[in-house]
Image: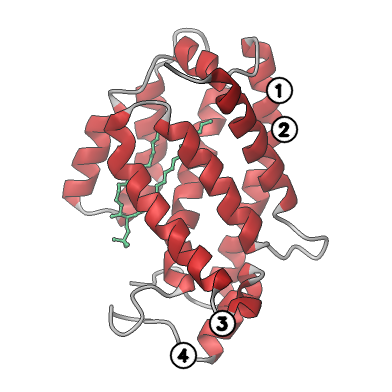
Amino acid sequence: AVALEDLKFTLQEVLDTFKSCLSEHKDVFLEHYVAGWRGLVRFMNCLGSVFSFISKDAVNKIQILVNHLNGENGAHYVTIQSMVKYELDSQLVDLTKRGSFPESGCRTLLRLHRALRWLELFLERLQTSTEDSNTSVMCSEAYNESLAQHHAWIIRKAAGTAFWALPGRATFFDVMNVGSPEQVMAVLGDTLPLISEVYQVTEDLYAQNNILELP
Ligand code: 1PX
């Protein structure tokens, strides 16, 4: 059975953590970024086991970043900005092909960053959806416009199959457990600008450092 209290807590947590991600100077705190992802993964796990291959990869990447944060060089990983500077200055990143640093913070975070774009596009669609909109279609459209471009055929195939197992819009809203569809819309309206801003700040940082295509 779905534990509604947990879900409510989770979605509120996601909202709160993305709110607390950005400092007043637009630095992104890695700890909160990772916490935001944890909340999303918890929510996804409640949608069914067909999504577990997706959440396994997300959890794996979250754990890599947490290990950096808790490691002996953790002080350099407080913000995404300091992480990028530290890893590039210290040559801890594989820039053109996979090599000595398959678990660099930069390449690992880039994967989650691309997934954040999927989330932004999906939530935008949810927000402008109507009663007869199809969540599977919204999800795959958002995916095709973002993450799919970075995935091999076999992953795209598996993801596409999983999307058909998404619950319909009404159930999806129920599972979010924030109240009426109007209240869901209000929560989305609250969350989306924050997610967009975190996405854009990260995107600009990666673009400036020319690391948007890390292997
Ligand atoms: C209110 C709605 C909230 C919905 C929350 C859903 C959270 C979704 C979390 C998705 C995290 C996906 C991370 C994927 C990272 C990635 O691209 N990894 C690939 C590349 O990694 P590598 O180390 O090899 O370079 C990796 O190959 C990925 C494998 C797993 C398949 C990824 C499919 C991603 C689909 C994303 C859409 C999720 C749909 C959830 C339905 C709600």
- Quarter of the image for residue 139 reads top left
**Residue to which mark 4 is pinned:** 91
Task: Residue at 46% x, 12% y: name it.
Answer: 171
Pick whichever of labels 3 and 4 is earlier in the sequence. Answer: 3
**Residue to which mark 1 is pinned:** 186
**Residue to which mark 3 is pinned:** 72
**Residue to which mark 2 is pinned:** 190
Report, in whole angstroms, how far the alpha carbon at label 3 lies from the one at label 1: 42 Å
Pick whichever of labels 2 and 3 is earlier in the sequence. Answer: 3
Pick whichever of labels 1 and 4 is earlier in the sequence. Answer: 4
Badge 1 density bin: few <14, some 14–19, many ≥20, Cα 10 Å:
few
Where residue 69 sits in the image (x, y, percent)?
57, 70
- Amino acid marked by disc 1: Ala
Query: Tags 1 and 4 in contact by the CB under 8 Å rule?
Result: no
Report if the beta carbon of the residue with label 4 is closer than 8 angstroms to ligand 1.
no
Q: Looking at the image, is 190 positioned above or below residue 156? A: above
Query: Tags 1 and 2 in contact by the CB under 8 Å rule?
Result: yes
Query: Tags 3 and 1 in contact by the CB under 8 Å rule?
Result: no
Report, in whole angstroms, how far the alpha carbon at label 1 lies from the one at label 4: 44 Å
Pick whichever of labels 3 and 1 is earlier in the sequence. Answer: 3
- Amino acid marked by disc 3: Glu
- Amino acid marked by disc 4: Gln
